[in-house]
Amino acid sequence: MTSALITGITGQDGSLLAEFLLAKGYRVTGLVRRTSGDFPWRLEASRSRLNLIDGDLLDSGSLFRAVELAAPDEVYHLAAQSFVGASFDQPELTANVTGLGTVRMIEAVRRCAPHARFYQASSSEMFGDAPHSPQRENTPFRPRSPYGAAKVFAHHSAVNAREAHGMWVSCGILFNHEGPRRGIEFVTRRISHAVARIKFGLDSELTLGNLDARRDWGSATDYVEAMWLMMQADEPSDWVVATGESHSVREFCEVAFAYAGLNWTDHVRVDPDRRRPTDITGLIGDATRIEAELGWVRKTSFKSLVEQMVDADLARIAQNLGKG
Ligand code: NAP
């Protein structure tokens, strides 16, 4: 039985990947941070089939222990301080968790499971102020946020581990991907959540920063499959995963509110104070290489992604109201 270790298993991608690997017959171990809160909601569906180990990217010893206990064939390193907005307020923490945390994880695998395959969750935010569009594997990195800068450091550290130590390391340069499990702080989920609350009469207004911000938004379900495909490749490498389409926050609002029978202009208010100190424009990815080399196929359209997110938030609120 193939053994996988997932850092960030309580997050959007980690929880989806865990279910994907369990369905393929893997033994799945997840690294979880100790919290005083409830059991992580995203793992409810899979909890009885998972092996969870306490650990933190800020604590090397716990990472060494986790790798030893899991004895993985494949390590999916997804944990990070992953929110770009928060990285402007907490740049040092972001560098420590997202940047150095990756180095700690690579070292733990190099020492304790040197033959394991390693996946690094790289990000389109590394491209930042990109010199051309669409972005490909060889596009230079010009990050525009502390998060993007930390991911560039982590990415180069992962590539160096491959080149210097001969580790089997692949980096997925993933563009934004969303879904019903997206964290509530991200703009797409803020919109779908607000639509559901407005539909049920619990709210009337949603405040957003920049309606013209554009992103290449894909589905997290499609993207975790890309991660797995990269780990099955004959040789490690780095691949861009993207839809090749760009949509604005305004378009996201239009589709989401209309799906719930609402007019977005009646409910969305713009507050310039919510804008980021620096933002990126014109990021759009070219996934030709992973499609051609690994047979990855995008399955979810933009409209369907938005509708899935609204459906999930409507169902959650209906359930909560039913409980109340
Ligand atoms: P997410 O939902 O924010 O999940 C982040 C995960 O990292 C959570 O499980 C979190 O644990 C864990 N984590 C944070 N700090 C940690 C620490 N100090 N020690 C151990 N674990 C820690 O992120 P995601 O959307 O699933 O993304 C997965 C990865 O892909 C991230 O590295 C992200 O930066 C990258 N990425 C995401 C996108 C995207 O659009 N989603 C695009 C490109 C790259 P808690 O539950 O305890 O907070």
Image: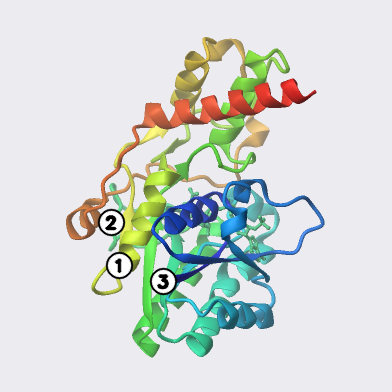
Give the residue number, with chain letter if any, for mark 3.
Answer: 2
User: Horizontal and vertical percent for residue 69?
Assistant: 59, 80
59 left or right, relative to 229? right
Q: Amino acid at mark 1?
A: Gln
User: Horizontal and vertical percent for residue 215?
Assistant: 42, 39
How packed mark 3 is, by other alpha carbons closer than 10 Å (few <14, some 14-19, many 20 or more), is: few
* Up/down of 302 relative to 10, above or below: above
User: Horizontal and vertical percent for residue 192?
Assistant: 56, 27
Label 3, secondary structure: give it.
Answer: loop
83 left or right, relative to 143? right
In terms of sequence position, does the residue under pointer 3 or pointer 1 come before the other?
Answer: 3
Which is more foreground, mark 3 or mark 1? 3
Label 2, secondary structure: give it.
Answer: loop
Give the residue number, with chain letter if any, for mark 1.
Answer: 232
Residue 8 seen in the current view: yes
In terms of sequence position, does the residue under pointer 1 or pointer 2 come before the other?
Answer: 2
Give the residue number, with chain letter if any, for mark 2.
Answer: 136
Label 1, secondary structure: give it.
Answer: loop
Q: Quadrant of ligand 1?
A: bottom right
Looking at the image, which residue is at 48% across and 41% down? Answer: 178
